[in-house]
Amino acid sequence: MATLVVPPAGSSTSGKPKEKKSQEEIAAEFQQLRNQQRNLVNNLNTIEMDLKEHKTVIDTLKTVEQSRKCFRLIGGVLVEQTVEVVLPQLELNKAQLEKLIEEGKEQITKKGLEINQFKDEHNIKVRGQEPSQPAASDKENASEEKPSGNRNVLLTSGESENFFHLTVTGQLESAHFPMGPDGGGLFCRYDIVAGPDWELVSGLRSAVTQSARTESDYRTVVFNMPIEFTMKSTNPYGWPQIVFSLYGANIWNVETNRGYTRVHCPLSGSSSGRTVRAPLFIPKYANMCSAAMSWISGVNPELRDPKILADGSKHKGLACETYGELVVRLQAISRGSTQMALDWGQTAVDDRY
């Protein structure tokens, strides 16, 4: 717990003495300022990642036809639009995000000045931030002073003791179908889903692959999409999962889903990573009339929010069939778990599998 050594208050020159603050109040107020600064930095990182995603999508849409159909996620609902409609909206959002980033940097600068002013006002010294070496005359003067009661000392623990990091790297290699895919122009989207205590530090929370087709091997569609992100958390609850959504064109050249799957991020892995073959499942209608219309039109039912697959209690009773699989190679590195007394239960036996 943060502790402070508060010097005795001197006499005030004004008629009314200045109200003193206890060391608990000073520590709480200083910690509150630091938390506010940390929240501003986290919000800025989130906005910068959103801006990076907007730039990637805008650059991609500029290379395709304006009349091409595309899908945009609005309020958790996938809305069908065209490039001509979506591109101006993304340009407007990009300009607003750039403005928010500039305002966020100014707020962080002001908050830093406020924290430094508070430290100087209460003569606070943070452990780990040692002052520069004093001159010889300063050392002589300091030796004459008593070591107690002339400086507030704030003892804070490092952030590495409060949470741990998990870095996941790898790639979505390919999709394999025993009898070949039912259509062409396949592309896949992935979304990272984690518990409430997990926070994305770097990387993309969701991304979309390029459109691919089968070539030499009619059963395999190669994507080779890199996956890399880092998250931090205070506990292992809600371990990160990756939800994949596969889409493609049917015989009527209409884009529809070709299956969903999810993969748990590994606890640890070798330098070459671990390969996971995740089965793809396609939702099916429960009544015969809707199933017949789906068979005639070639359009499969879609999940409004595929992230519900990460929670087993939210998709109970879902009618589906499996066809094909995704090949994913992942490896993970954790940092800071030892200081939090976390043991993943890994043994040398795991390396044989």
Image (tube, helix red, strand yellow):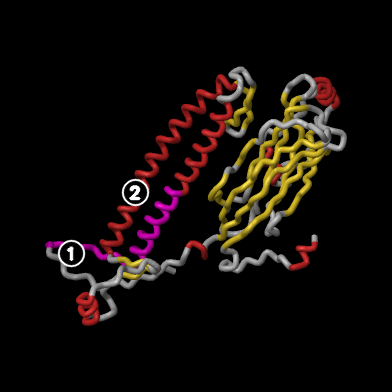
Q: In the displayed image of the protein, which residue is found farthest to the front?
A: 216
- Residue 161 visible in this rendered orientation of the protein: yes
Give the quarter of the figure containing the N terminus: bottom left
Position in image of residue 186 (x %, y %): 73, 31
Q: Which residue is pictured at 48% across the width and 41% down the height?
A: 48
Q: Which residue is pictured at 36% across the width and 60% down the height?
A: 30
Name the mark on residue 17.
Answer: 1
Report the front residue among 11 and 343.
Answer: 343
Q: Is 202 a magenta residue? A: no
Could you tell me the amino acid type at mark 1?
Pro
From the viewer's perspective, is residue 332 above or below residue 27? above
Q: Which residues are magenta?
A: 14-41
* Residue bearing mark 2: 109
Q: Which residue is pictured at 29% across the width and 59% down the height?
A: 118
- Residue 302 visible in this rendered orientation of the protein: no
Disc 1: CA contacts within 10 A as few (<14), some (14-19) or many (>=20):
few
Position in image of residue 97 (x %, y %): 45, 35
